[in-house]
Amino acid sequence: MVLKDITVYLTEKCNFHCSYCYQKRGKNTLDFSQIKSFFDFFYPYLDDECYVCFYGGEPLLYFDKLRQSVDYLQSINNIQKKNFIYTITTNGSLLNRSILAYLQKNRFHITLSFDGLNQDTTRQPGTSTKILSKIKEILKLPGIQLEISSVFTPETINSLFKSIQYIIARGATDVNYYLSMIHYWNDTTFKILRTQLQDLSDFLITLNKRNGSIPVQNFRNKPRIGMSVCTAGQDRLVLAPDGTLWGCFLIRDYFTYHDDHEDFNNFSFGDLDSFIRSHGSTYSKILRNHRRLRQENYFTPQILCRDCSEKLECSICPADAAFTSSFLGYIPDYLCQLYKMMRKIKKTFWEKIE
């Protein structure tokens, strides 16, 4: 194992009730003793530069355990001095000066979930103004890298462009949008999305001509060519709130909803203690299943992805697709068309940029 990314999934608990949340709420929360065992065992397998991610639920509900975790990992890193890049995904509601000072001290990358103009309806009523003030405060802190993550549903897609524009106007230089995969996108919402992305593309082209920036991650990198491969389990692992190990948090969340699924035991690395005792055989056995998660092995109702002329341009997360199809690697037709449309708009964007 050479792990470039590990995630401490602190808790299933959250203080928000987002309308599109795919996570199954629970009471499980990691004990520090579990986190300590996780770090002790996997430390030798961590790459010299490794992302250490804190996730939930809402991880700041247990900031004390996050701080214990970082402090402990730093203490065992005194000899080899690996480069750890700390990240946290949070709704931002619990951020205060003390927490921000700690995150700044340890140069955290913060992914802050904020839905722009839809914040008070999709995430939590009455939180928009408070989160905007937190964003303004964070942007003034050197040492913290801030990414704003926004989610849109078929009901809110008509405000995607204005919401992203609104966030950028408040100083954000790193924005990412996601489409809710637990909703069905029909022809009407499909057309609205196309118009919204075209408007966003035109706006970003103008912005790029003015200052050379592309603040929206979805457009920032040139279209890729090559077979898409999910690296869950291969270079990353997640310690879940119930003490089990998974290849990524999305796969874990999917199987939490489908704990009777026939593939559950094929993608779970089991509980931490059992894995430590038998990791030699367990890791290689489960890894074989993760290595099948390649674009060429996926399929739609109409075609095997390996037979698609666009297979080297396509990149669909198998777990994302599974939330709508109930099967890892099965991609509904509407999702396939959605991604084709987004690729086309991005390709045109880069043709104009260049």
Image: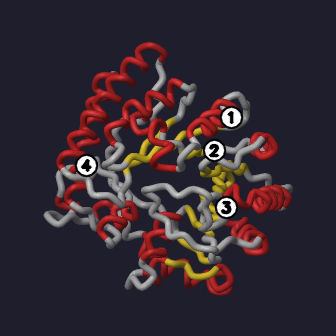
From the image, tell me which residue sits under label 2: 110
Secondary structure type for disc 2: strand
Nearer mark to the viewer, of 3 and 2? 2
User: Which amino acid lies under the numbered mark 1 shown in the image of this protein?
Assistant: Ile
Coloured how? secondary structure
**Label 3 or label 4, whichever comes before in sequence order:** 3
Residue 287 drawn above or below residue 211 = below
Image location (x, y in percent) of residue 284: 51, 78
Farthest residue to the left: give it: 302
From the image, tell me which residue sits under label 1: 138
**Label 4 or label 2, whichever comes before in sequence order:** 2
Image location (x, y in percent) of residue 133: 65, 33
Question: Which residue is nearer to you in this view: 229 or 316?
Answer: 316
Farthest residue to the front: give it: 126
From the image, tell me which residue sits under label 3: 46
Label 3 neighbourhood size at 10 Å, few (<14), some (14-19), many (20+)? many
User: Which amino acid lies under the numbered mark 4 shown in the image of this protein?
Assistant: Leu
**Label 2 or label 1, whichever comes before in sequence order:** 2
Please give the name of the residue rendered at 49% of the width and 55% of the height, measured from the top-left corner.
Answer: 18
Label 2–label 1 contact, CB within 8 A:
yes
Residue 173 drawn above or below residue 186 = above
